[in-house]
Image: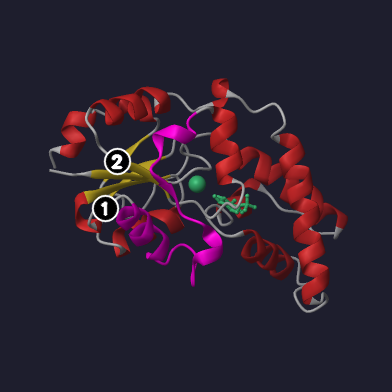
Amino acid sequence: MKKGFVFDLDGVITDTAKFHYIAWKNLAKKLGITINETFNETLKGISRMDSLDKILAYGQRENEFTTAEKEALAQKKNDEYVKLLADLSETDLLPGVHDFLVQAKERNIPCSIASASKNAPMILEKLGVLDFFGHIVDPETLKKGKPDPEIFVKAAESINVAPKDAIGFEDAQAGIEGIKAAGMYAVGISATETLKGADFQVTSMTELDIEQLINQ
Ligand code: BG6
Ligand code: MG
């Protein structure tokens, strides 16, 4: 029986992935780089600075900026992203998420967040679900980002659950790989992508049966 749940945030709890895309697309455009949705898939789950590096490499401009300049560019992207989140509220939870969290709480199954986003606490607060989570891994404490398993191992251990007893929920390929490398059961959530390596994939959390999941 599974004993804990580890959730990615962007694309699993709420659809902030679209706002990340808008903010990156606008920044890239100012740099003369055009990104499309296919390229954007490769940014999902990836940290802010790694995403910027990928965009610069995609536009063959990777050697043109100092570290300080890149930090300023990443800050600019984040400023626009945070502005796009201004009206975020409970109505922006993805379908089935609130019900699932309530059911987990009723069964005393602890939940934690494994997100690369430094904005995670603020976003969860705006969505009104902060209290459902026993811990949010601070991405600043990580040696490596997804697809490394570190964030998922930390998230499971933070709620006192061994990774083999935990279920991870992800919308990104890098995340599924990290969950599997951590030795956890991986639930992929995506209506558009086939997530390779996921133990189980659904298009939305409304399709999940919590009893079936925990009795793996
Ligand atoms: C991940 C997103 O959850 O967080 C990425 O999938 C994003 O797209 C990353 O770049 C970092 O987020 P933030 O909010 O710290 O810029
Ligand atoms: Mg995600």
43 displayed left or right of 147: right
User: Magenta segment range?
Assistant: 129-158
Q: What's the residue type where badge 1 is placed?
A: Asn
- Magenta region includes residue 86: no
Q: Within the image, what quadrant is residue 1 found in?
A: top left
54 displayed left or right of 33: left
* Labels 2 & 1 near each other (Cβ < 8 A): yes
Q: Secondary structure at mark 2?
A: loop
Evaluate whether residue 177 shows in this view. Answer: no
Which residue sits at x=78%, y=47%?
A: 79
x and y percentages locating residue 5 in the rendered image: 31, 43
- Magenta region includes residue 143: yes
Which residue sits at x=63%, y=38%?
A: 18
Q: Which residue is mark 2?
A: 110
x and y percentages locating residue 140 in the rendered image: 56, 63
Which residue sits at x=77%, y=56%?
A: 75
Q: Which residue is mark 1?
A: 160
Q: Within the image, what quadrant is residue 81 found in?
A: top right
Q: Is residue 117 above or below residue 191?
A: below
Which residue sits at x=47%, y=38%?
A: 192
Q: Residues within 10 Å of mark 2 (few under 14, many from 20)?
A: many
x and y percentages locating residue 87 in the rendered image: 70, 26
Mark sitting on residue 112: none
199 and 179: which one is in front?
179
